[in-house]
Amino acid sequence: MRRLTVLSRSYCHLCDDMIAALESFRGRFSLTFDVDVVDVDQHPALEAQWGDKVPVLLDAGQEICHYFLDEDALQRVVSSGLQGESTSTGAVPGAF
């Protein structure tokens, strides 16, 4: 099963909105994917890399979208059948 990651913050209303939009998207299209939510403030390296873009939706460390859910981009990713390739610069430590 595909595993996506939302880089989030506890006090971020856009993060809450993206997570809710992901759940709605999954329900409308009957797609199967898991979502891990990672608080960037608990991971200094992630905060340094992604902090100004939070919330960020990732597939195997590769950005799908940030700030707001891009349903077209997400549809392309989850319909592709293959999970994105992690790279040493884009991998999210401890998220998978």
Image (cartoon, rainbow, N blue to C red):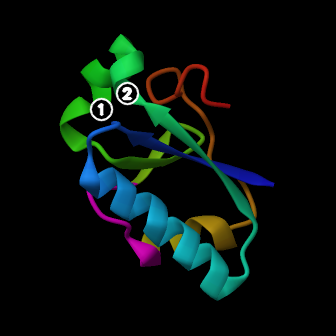
Q: Residue at x 41, y 16 (%)?
A: 43
Q: Position of residue 67 (x, y in %)?
A: 26, 56
As drawn, the residue found furthest toward the bottom would be 28
How far apart in space, not on screen, are marks 1 and 2 (Cα)? 8 Å
For the N terminus, the image quarter is bottom right
Numbered circle sitting on residue 40: 2
Category of crowding for the residue at label 1, using alpha-carbon neighbours closer than 10 angstroms: few (below 14), some (14–19), many (at least 20): some
Give the residues drawn in magenta, as a range: 65-72
Residue at x-position 30% and y-position 23%: 47
Q: Which mark is first along the chain, 2 or 1?
A: 2
Residue at 32% x, 47% y is: 55
When the figure is inspected, residue 75 is found, relative to residue 28, above or below; the finding is above
- Where disc 2 sits, the SS reads helix
Residue 76 at x, y percent in the picture: 55, 72
Q: Amino acid at mark 2?
A: Val
Residue plotted at (73% across, 81% down): 30
**x and y percent of residue 20 in the render?**
46, 66
Query: In the picture provided, is 93 more to the left or to the right than 19?
Result: right
Q: What percent of the width, then of the height, locates residue 87?
A: 54, 28
**Residue linked to disc 1:** 50
Q: Could you tell me if the residues under marks 1 and 2 are in contact, i.e. CB atoms within 8 Å? A: yes
The C terminus lies in quadrant: top right
Residue placed furthest toward the top: 44
Name the kind of residue labelled 1 in the image.
Trp
